[in-house]
């Protein structure tokens, strides 16, 4: 999920001090609790508003983890999710600065999102192998795991071989990536809900023109999730809530239903979820 997305009251620049933002975060806590959701893992955003939600959640019984802000390569996809990095030196410096704010893990955006105009095409890979390895190693040396947003076989394999702990999205994943994921123990968070929900939208939705291509993405991703589960790949529930047509709270329940339909069990999702969140 992205607590800073899907909410028009979040001030992208002054979100961490805005009174409306505090109210929004309190609302999020109650919303997720009412849906029976006990733990959340955020993907970060430019406002860094996750700091507020983490503080509010401490006394609520809701477990919440956040990278605060993500890192992306300058001039590539990700400007609304975090900080741009120019090179390895810049990456290490900005990561050290972020670590002073006590993120629960590090988020790296390696590729763009999937194209709505040409099936199977993703925004380009931003970081080189050397840059990925350096940043992930640095995070690990600081005791932090690394979430990597990656699509396409090339992007996913680059993330896997660079030491990523979890792969977010993974659209276009192939058998080689699944095998590498299983052997390395990397957790896959496939986020079926965004394309699945767009594929089901009604005629009144402005996203209706993307239903057909979204259906293609969803069905192909379903097949790969089913295969991954049968192979023994570790799969975790992550809805990408805040994305278009993935509402906070309900989006998590939607994602659970999609994963269960792929053959996963609630017990397996709970076990891997606890592993990713870092709770016993």
Image (tube, rainbow, N blue to C red):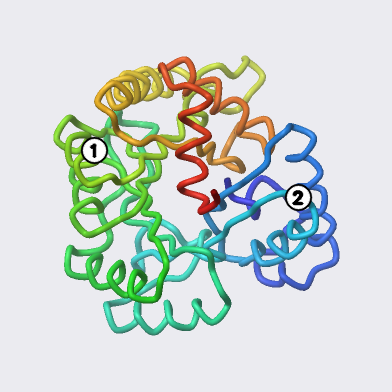
| SS class, disc 1 | helix
Whole-angstrom CA distance, mark 2 to mark 1, is 33 Å
Task: State the image coordinates of residue 237 (x, y, percent, origin top left).
Answer: 50, 35
Of 51 and 195, nearer the camera is 51
Residue drawn at x 55%, y 16% is 200
Residue drawn at x 45%, y 39% is 272
Q: Residue at the front extreme?
A: 280
Residue drawn at x 78%, y 40% is 31
Relative to residue 169, is residue 202 drawn left or right? right
Task: State the image coordinates of residue 228 (x, y, percent, origin top left).
Answer: 29, 27
Of 242 and 11, nearer the camera is 242
Dot 2 or dot 1: first in sequence order is 2
| SS class, disc 2 | loop
Q: Are marks 2 and 1 in contact (CB under 8 Å)?
A: no
Q: Residues within 10 Å of mark 2 (few under 14, many from 20)?
A: few
What residue is shown with label 1?
182
Q: Residue at the left extreme?
A: 176
Relative to residue 161, is residue 53 drawn left or right? right
Question: Compared with residue 88, is residue 237 higher up or lower down, i.e. above or below?
Answer: above
Of 107 and 271, nearer the camera is 271
Q: Residues within 10 Å of mark 1 (few under 14, many from 20)?
A: some
Q: Quadrant of the N terminus?
A: top right
Q: Quadrant of residue 185?
A: top left
Task: State the image coordinates of residue 187 (x, y, percent, origin top left).
Answer: 35, 43
Residue drawn at x 29%, y 84% is 89
| Label of residue 246 in the image | none
Of 208 and 255, nearer the camera is 255
Question: Compared with residue 189, is residue 71 higher up or lower down, i.e. above or below?
Answer: below
What residue is shown with label 2?
61
């Amino acid at each position: 999920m992205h607590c800073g997305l899907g909410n028009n009251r979040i001030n992208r620049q002054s979100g961490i001090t805005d009174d409306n933002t505090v109210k929004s975060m309190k609302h999020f806590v109650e919303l997720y609790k009412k849906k029976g959701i006990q733990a959340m893992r955020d993907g970060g955003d430019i406002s860094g508003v996750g700091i507020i939600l983490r503080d509010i959640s401490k006394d609520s019984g809701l477990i919440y983890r956040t990278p605060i802000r993500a890192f992306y390569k300058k001039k590539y996809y990700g400007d609304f999710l975090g900080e741009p990095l120019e090179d390895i030196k810049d990456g290490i410096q900005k990561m050290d600065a972020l670590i002073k704010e006590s993120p629960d893990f590090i988020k790296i955006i390696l590729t763009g999102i999937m194209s709505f105009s040409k099936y199977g095409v993703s925004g380009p890979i931003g970081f080189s192998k050397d840059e990925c390895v350096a940043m992930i190693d640095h995070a690990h040396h600081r005791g932090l795991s690394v979430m990597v947003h990656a699509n396409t076989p090339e992007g996913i394999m680059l993330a896997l071989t660079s030491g990523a702990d979890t792969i977010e999205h993974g659209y276009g994943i192939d058998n080689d990536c699944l095998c590498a994921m299983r052997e390395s123990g990397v957790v896959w968070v496939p986020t079926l809900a965004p394309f699945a929900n767009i594929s089901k939208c009604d005629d009144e939705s402005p996203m209706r023109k993307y239903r057909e291509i979204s259906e293609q993405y969803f069905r192909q991703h379903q097949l790969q999730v089913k295969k991954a589960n049968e192979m023994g790949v570790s799969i975790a529930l992550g809805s990408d809530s805040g994305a278009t047509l993935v509402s906070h709270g309900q989006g998590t329940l939607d994602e659970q239903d999609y994963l269960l339909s792929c053959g996963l069990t609630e017990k397996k999702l709970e076990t891997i979820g606890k592993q990713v969140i870092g709770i016993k």
